């Protein structure tokens, strides 16, 4: 897993014919589980200082909003194994086709794992090819919602 560094939002000026007197750039630096937040902050500060040395900017202010802690999931936990079994049964697919993967994403479940002091967290939702997740016209199909509801019911009620 690799950390992500995104330039997310840039705001400057009010009109196209007036040079703005300030600019605000919001970055999103995704922290992965093996990283130290202090090291990540220093990495960002160092990058800004390097840029300032080559810039004509008169002033640069930095603020940090550490919004989401990293999340590490134990893919061998009993809960994850149960979810895999549920997916097999609901979707009628062999275990080999179920892919476990690490993802770098902003996710509030990191707080839940932190508070409960556990890696036994299940990340599962309704998404499919063409959903355009977090994009313009994000969508999900009703048939995918129905299958997900079946997964939840089977996870909670099935005896296997």
Image (cartoon, rainbow, N blue to C red):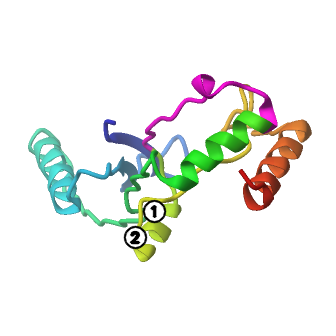
Q: Nearer the viewer, residue 133 or 97?
A: 97
Q: Main secondary structure of the magenta part?
A: loop
Picture disc at residue 137: none
Label 2: element kind:
helix
Residue at image mark 1? 110
Specify start and end residues of the magenta stretch as a single range: 90-104
Residue 137 visible in the shown view: no
Name which residue lies at 78% across and 48% down: 151
Residue found farthest to the front:
160
Do the residues bearing badges 2 and 1 touch, measured as CB atoms within 8 Å?
yes
Residue 24 visible in the shown view: yes
Asked if residue 80 lies left or right of residue 74, the reply is right
Q: Nearer the viewer, residue 94 or 152?
A: 94
On whether residue 4 falls in the magenta region, the answer is: no
Residue 93, relative to residue 89: is it above or below? above
Name which residue lies at 73% across and 55% down: 155
Asked if residue 139 lies left or right of residue 142, the reply is left
Residue at image mark 2? 114
Name which residue lies at 32% across and 41% down: 3
Asked if residue 63 lies left or right of residue 108, the reply is left
Residue found farthest to the bottom:
115
Label 1: element kind:
helix
Name which residue lies at 84% across and 51% down: 149
Residue 128, relative to residue 66: is it above or below? above
How far from the left and from the top, in percent, is residue 24?
Answer: 39, 55
């Amino acid at each position: 897993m690799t950390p992500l560094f995104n330039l997310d939002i840039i705001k400057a000026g009010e009109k196209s014919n007036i040079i703005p007197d300030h600019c605000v750039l919001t970055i999103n630096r995704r922290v992965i589980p093996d990283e130290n937040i202090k090291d990540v902050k220093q990495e960002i500060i160092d990058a800004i200082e390097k840029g300032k040395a080559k810039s004509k900017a008169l002033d640069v202010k930095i603020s940090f909003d550490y919004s989401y802690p990293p999340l590490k999931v134990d893919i061998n936990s009993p809960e994850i194994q149960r979810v895999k079994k549920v997916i097999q049964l609901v979707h009628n697919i062999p275990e080999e086709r179920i892919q476990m993967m690490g993802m770098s994403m902003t996710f509030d479940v990191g707080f839940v794992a932190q508070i409960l002091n556990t890696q036994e967290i299940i990340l599962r939702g309704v998404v499919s090819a063409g959903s355009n997740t977090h994009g313009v016209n994000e969508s999900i199909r009703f048939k995918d919602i129905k299958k997900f509801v079946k997964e939840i019911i089977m996870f909670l009620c099935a005896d296997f």
